[in-house]
Image (cartoon, rainbow, N blue to C red):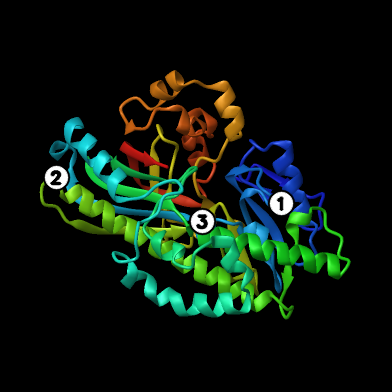
Amino acid sequence: MPIKQVMTEGEKPVKVWTDDLDSTARQQLLNISKLPFIHHHVAAMPDVHAGIGATIGSVIATHQAIIPAAVGVDIGCGMAAVRTSLTAEQIDERVLKKVFDQISRDVPVGRGQHRDERALNEAAMPFAAPLQTMTEKHPQLLKAFGRFSNWINQMGTLGGGNHFIEICLDEAGQVWIMLHSGSRGIGNAIGNYFIELARRDMERWFIQLPDRDLAYFPEGSEHFDDYVAAVSWAQSYARENRDQMMTLVLAALARHLPVFNVTTEVVNCHHNYVAREHHYQADVWVTRKGAIRARAGDLGIIPGSMGARSYIVRGLGNPESFQSCAHGAGRRMSRTAAERQFTTADLATQTEGVICRKDKGVLDEIPSAYKDIDQVMANQSDLVEIVHRLKQVVCVKG
């Protein structure tokens, strides 16, 4: 059985799918397990590592309460992938460099956004009325994300950090497009705003927590319903953001490659989100912070780092993980530590064969800063089965 350890020092057990658990992440998991509304146990995926308040790679089932910082500020962050009819024989390095440049022009990255609202206005409009209602009730949100139109201009954009767009080849030589992004600036604003409201509620109610970042909203409290509505909005926005980016990337490929189509294999999954689910004879809120849902038959995406392989998987529906699995390799070291330890020469070596940035600006994303993705997969053989193995040939980052 891949569960490597069970921690019992808290109020509820913590089941961990790895032996690679640092002391900070361990303490964060124990802190979570001490909260009075935790349901049954806490699950820690094999890519688990320290986060803010709650560990990244944790699955937290709760009775009648949600911890906003466990959901995080990149609400709805996740993955999308499509398999195309293109094959390895139809692409070469010269063409792929053109595609890399085209994607870099067509999809804003980092802090960039589209220059106007025209192109994506139609996709964004269904989100406008609910956001208007939200900001009328919580006008401070407008200050947090700047001009009201920013959220429209940021739809179909990548962001920075560990977000990426990749062109990959599977074991049969089929070309895939894979991307990783979330709810951009508006999701960040929503997350930070409600995290602060939860902290204030804890102070107002004189509730002592093992970590102030575990502040929560109980069902029936002043901000609970507003938070659920806001986080649901951001999760839907994040998914649409990935859909719009995928459209832009497919168009970029079409400008330089032979005519192709997208096969029926299309995957889009969140890995920073909260949802209402049924587990261990109870209806509960399940927060996946750096984990994806892996019900029996669910397709998911588990990416490696810039120079490592990635996986398309099918869930096995394991109840002990609350039907969840890892969301990626998981960081082994902080961004600052990676920048201190490695050089751009190391980055070039570790990303050999991949058309990507190899400069200091992405040094913190060097593959060695991440855990071994193959070990992560071995540690969750009871959570998912592998459907495809992907190796990137192009990687666009912010």
Reply above or below: 71 against 148.
Answer: above
Badge 3 element: loop
Query: Which residue is under mark 3?
Result: 271
Q: Nearer the viewer, residue 82 or 184?
A: 184
Closer to viewer: mark 2 or mark 3: 2
How many neighbours does mark 3 have within 10 angstroms: few (below 14), some (14-19), or many (20 or more)? many
Q: Indicate the amino acid at tag 1.
A: Gly
What residue sits 44% from the left and 53% below the top? Answer: 181
Closer to viewer: mark 1 or mark 3: 1
The answer to which image quadrant residue 269 occupies is: bottom left
Mark identifier at residue 53: 1
Mark identifier at residue 391: none
Q: Distance between the residues labelled 1 and 3?
A: 17 Å
Q: How far apart are marks 2 and 3 (CA)?
A: 32 Å
Q: Can residue 100 be seen in this view?
A: yes
Badge 2 element: loop
Q: Indicate the amino acid at tag 3.
A: His
Mark identifier at residue 257: 2
Q: How many marks?
A: 3
Q: Nearer the viewer, residue 122 or 356?
A: 122
Sequence-earlier tag: 1 or 3:
1
Give the percent coordinates (x, y) of residue 379: 54, 41
Q: Can residue 172 be seen in this view?
A: no
Q: Which of 67 and 132 is in front in this view?
A: 132
The answer to which image quadrant residue 246 occupies is: bottom left
Q: Is residue 301 left or right of residue 73?
A: left
